[in-house]
Amino acid sequence: MTAIFISYRRDDSRDASRRVAERLAERFGKDAVFLDVEAIEAGADFSQTILDGVRAASVMLVVIGPRWLGAQSVEGKPRLEDPEDFVRREIETALDWRVPIVPVLIGGASMPAEAKLPASIRKLSARQAHTVMDPGWDQDIDRLAGIVAKAYDVEPIPVDTFSYLRGRRQGLFRYPFRLARLLLRPKRFLATRSLGRRGDLVDALVFFAVSTALAEWLLIVEWPGKSWLLFVSGVSVGALGALVLSIPLYLAWRVAGADREYGRVLTVLSYQTSVVHMGLGLSGFLFFTSINFTSPDRLRRVRDAIAEGGVGGTLRNDVNALLTTTGWETVSPYLFLFFVALLAWMIASWGAYRRALALSRMRSLIAFTLTVLLASTPVLLFVLTAATR
């Protein structure tokens, strides 16, 4: 999928749109720019591919030339009045999915008046346009690229090692913003972060490392018997668990028909497990904080049990006691809702794999089923073996 979707009307701005796409591809990479002629593979569903590209985009550029508004069908009717007009549907989809839109005016065109647009896309007239003039074409496109990079979080291709490392450092400062986007719009965020570019997987692993470290810190803040060894162990186990889970996940997508795109699968999984780890960290923090607030003596007993007999002794003797505390009774409904929300988010984010790997919904369902079977089989075998002893 892509980060920059270019919407245009072929009989109005075909050549200009291609020039814009080529220039942006030099700045952001070919895979980051969607122009229907180049981006749609042979045999793909044209309509569905375009609409999926819009939904996954970080920003849509609507190229408007002198004949954009006045284009007519063979019957002599305005094409924008046709509900099936592709340009209209692209803009409608972007507005429905809240994809940012930047009108790009070329050839001396001006923004169409709100009254001349169909009701479903009249909000387009309120968007701030960027004008590209023939005399200063290169400079105007460079300014447009700067706007896309700064305002819509689309990263350019690094020109050298220093700029690459600087981009990774800047990514750390944007962590809260990216976490919010990941939580609120997972499919669109993940689709724009799994394009197969060199930095995609690195960014995902950095995001995963930060998320896992924060989650483990939250988990042990109120955990009895906390230590740096416990923190390091938790981060290591979280990383190892994600790596192990990526194997059946990748195998499932390969069986479902995906190309050899382990990097894209691991990229999406890294973001997903980041959210899972943050959810577990927050829930653990809430759990132990509530018990420590309402039943400090009970938590102190657990701390002593860990010091004397380790975590195993605590599990045998004190878990039932912990689950009958006032703190647990207070927080348990919230934890239940929290885990339901986390499960719903995981289901909602699954579509990012399909978009990143360009597969159908049926193949996505097959991959999901196979992943569940492959991942749960070792657990079931362990449970059955333990039960028969």
Image: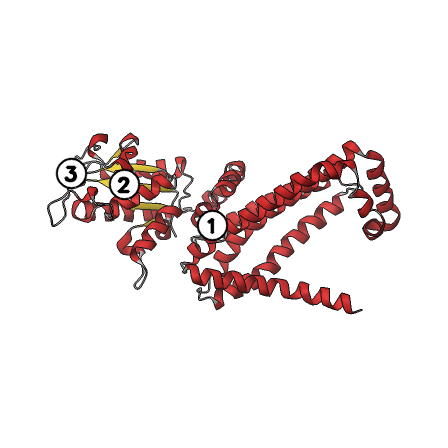
Which-is-in-front pick, marks 2 and 1? 2
Q: Which numbered disc covers residue 290?
A: none
Q: Which quadrant would residue 279 be assigned to in this image?
A: top right
Can residue 205 be seen here? The reply is no
Label total for image: 3
The amino acid type of the residue labelled 3 equals Pro
Place of residue 297 in the rendered image (x, y in percent of width and height, measured from the top left): 85, 35
Q: Which numbered disc covers residue 62?
A: 2
User: Image point 52% across, 42% down: which residue?
Assistant: 183
Instruction: Kindly state the secondary structure of the residue where label 3 is placed.
Output: loop
Q: Which quadrant would residue 137 be assigned to in this image?
A: top left
C-alpha distance separating marks 1 and 3: 39 Å
Q: Which quadrant would residue 382 be assigned to in this image?
A: bottom right
Read off the residue under disc 1: 199
Q: Which numbered disc covers residue 66?
A: 3
Neighbours of disc 2 within 10 Å: few (<14), some (14-19), many (20+): many
C-alpha distance separating marks 2 and 1: 27 Å
Quadrant containing the C terminus is bottom right
C-alpha distance separating marks 2 and 3: 13 Å
